[in-house]
Image (cartoon, rainbow, N blue to C red):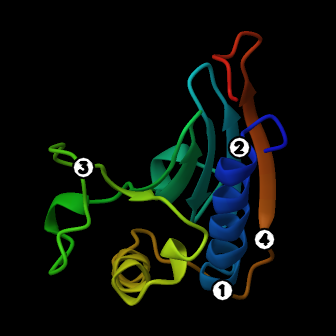
Amino acid sequence: MARYRPEVAQIGRAALTALRKQLPGTAEMVYDNFNALVIGFSTSERPSDAILSIGLYARWVNLSFLQDAMSLPDPDGLLRGTGNVVRSVRLTSPDDIGRPAVRALIAEAVARANPPIDPTLRRRLTIRAVSARRRPRK
């Protein structure tokens, strides 16, 4: 995260800290891709079991919901995108991850996780991909 603008890194760190507290027992998968640094939270080491992810881009951070996001209840209209599976919330400050509407979306995604999270497992961290080429991040 140190490669990002300070405000983006601060939002990313806040999101990562909050999600680690809310998602005990998940596997964290890190993808340092051409466009973004993405950290996915999954019920297993399989990317297809990922529930949500945070993506750090040059100027913003997205919280993406990866399982059946189309049907997540979103009374505050926070979810962006038109995809059938993935929707996201743009985080613009470190406090956004703690907003009640965002926490409710996360809680609902966790409740619907398939397979479900086993909170008794230890957190696992895997570096899945590091791209040799990256867009400028600052």
Q: Residue at x 68, y 28 (%)?
A: 137
Pointer 2 and pointer 3: residues touching (CB < 8 Å)?
A: no
List x then y, in percent, for residue 36. 59, 32
Mark positioned earlier in the residue sequence (2 or 3): 2
Q: Report the disc number at residue 14.
A: none
* Residue 24, percent from left and from top: 68, 81
Of the residues shown, which amino acid type is indicated by label 3? Val
Separation of marks 4 and 3 at Cα, in angstroms: 25 Å
Q: Nearer the viewer, mark 4 or mark 2?
A: 2
Question: Which residue corresponds to mark 3?
Answer: 85
Residue corresponding to mark 2: 30
Crowding near pointer 4: few (<14 within 10 Å), some, many (20+)? some
Q: Please, what is the three-letter code of the amino acid marked with disc 2?
A: Val
For the point 47% across and 77% down, which residue is it? Answer: 116
Q: Between tags 1 and 3, which lies in front?
A: 3
Nearest the viewer among 126 and 74 is 74
Circles 1 and 3 in contact, beta carbons < 8 Å: no
Q: Relative to residue 134, is residue 60 depicted above or below? A: below
Task: Return the disc, 4 or 2, that comes first in the chain's sequence.
Answer: 2
Q: Secondary structure at mark 4?
A: loop
**Image quarter of the C terminus:** top right
- Above or below, 3 against 28 in this view is above
Up/down of 92 relative to 19, above or below: above
Cβ atoms at labels 4 and 1 below 8 Å apart = no
Seen from this angle, which residue lies furthest right? 2
**Could you classify mark 2 by the number of other residues whose Cα lies within 10 Å: few (under 14), some (14-19), or many (20 or more)?**
many
Q: Which residue is mark 4?
A: 123
Residue under circle 1?
A: 119
Residue at the image point whose x is 15% and y is 67% from the top: 71
Amino acid type, callout 1: Pro
- Label 4 to label 1, Cα distance in Å? 9 Å
